[in-house]
Image: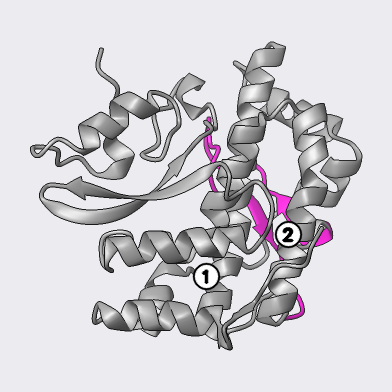
Amino acid sequence: MVAPDSIINGERWVERYDRLLQASGLDREAILAQSLQAPAQDRRALFSLAQCLEQPELLVQQIRHDYPDANDHKAVRTYASVLQQDLALSVLAPLTLRLFRYGEAPVANPARIFLAPIEEAGQTVSRWFQAPGQPLASEQAFLQGMAAQTEAWYPVFRQQLGVSPGAYWSSIGLGLGAPFSAVWNLADPASVCDLAQQWLEGFRNDANRFVDWIPAVFGGQKTAIPQRKGCCLKYLLPEGGYCGTCGVYRKERMAALNRPDHCQAPDQWQPAR
C-alpha cells in the first residue's frame, strides 16, 4: 500500500481544515471542542478488538448473548455490521477529531480497543472504546497507521463476520470524516465536500470509494453531507431506522433532498411507504 500524503503543497491537513473554517467565520478550537467528548474512564470491557480479530466467534457469541433476536446467520451479520459502524464512529471518529484539533492523536490500536457490555436492552452504539493513555502520532503517522489498521481489520469483518464491502468502508469513511461532519451545516458546502473528499482520498483505500461528500439543501439552507454507497443494515433491527447517509433508497432520498420544500434533518429521512 502506498503511504498516504499528509502535507499537500507544503500545507498540513490541520492547516487546510483551519483555513476552511476561517473562511466561514468559524473557530476550529470551538467547533472541535464541542464535538469531542471526554474519554470514558474505567469502562468495563468484554474483550479487545485484537481478540475479536483473532477469534471472530467471540463477537458472534456476544451478539447472540446480547441480542435475543440474533437467532440466525442473517441477524448476526446485521448486528456485526451495525457494531462495525459503531467501531468507526466511537473510536475512529474521536481520534480523527483529536488529530484535527491538536495536530496529533493516537492511532487506533486493536489491542487497546474494547467492546463494553450493553447498558440497556438493544444498545448498539457507544459499545467500542479505545483505552486512554495511548502514544500520540504525528499527522503523517496517523494517516499511515489508520490506513494500515483499517485494511488489516477488513478481511475478518468481511469474510468471517459477513459485513459487506460497502457497509465496512462507508462506515470507516464516516468515522475518518468526522471533522467535516462537525461543520456539515456551518461551513461552505462546496468547500467542505471538496476537502472532505480529498481527505478520504489520502488514505488510498476504499473509504473514499464508498462515501461521496455532496451538497444538499435542508429547509432552504445549503449543507454538505457524506452520502454512503453502502448500508450498515441498522434498518433491519427491531428499533432500527434509516441513517441520513444510508445507501438504501439512495436515488429516492437524493431526489427528496433536492426538493425545494425539503426540511428534514439528515438523520430523520424515511422512505415513502
Q: Left or right of 197: which side holds 2?
A: right
- Percent position (x, y) of residue 109? 78, 62
Residue type pointed to by label 1 = Leu
Q: Left or right of 245: which side holds 170?
A: right
Q: Is residue 114 above or below residue 239?
A: below
**Residue 195 appears in the picture as rendered:** yes
- Percent position (x, y) of residue 211? 51, 45
Residue at 55% x, 38% y: name it.
124
- Name the magenta segment's main secondary structure: loop
Can you tell which quarter of the image residue 2 is in?
bottom right
Residue type pointed to by label 2 = Ala
Residue at 78% x, 56% y: name it.
149
Residue at 61% x, 68% y: name it.
95
Disc 2: CA contacts within 10 A as few (<14), some (14-19) or many (>=20): many
Q: Is residue 242 above or below residue 71?
A: below
Image color mode: one colour
Give me the disc on residue 97: 1
SS label for mark 1: helix
Residue at 49% x, 20% y: name it.
236
Magenta residues (range): 111-136
Residue 143 lies in the magenta-colored region: no
**Residue 183 appears in the picture as rendered:** no
What residue does disc 2 label? 147
Q: Nearer the viewer, residue 82 or 272?
A: 272
Q: Is residue 146 above or below residue 23?
A: above
Residue 135 lies in the magenta-colored region: yes
Mark 1 or 2, closer to the camera: 2
Q: CA distance from mark 1 to mark 2?
A: 16 Å
The count of marks equals 2
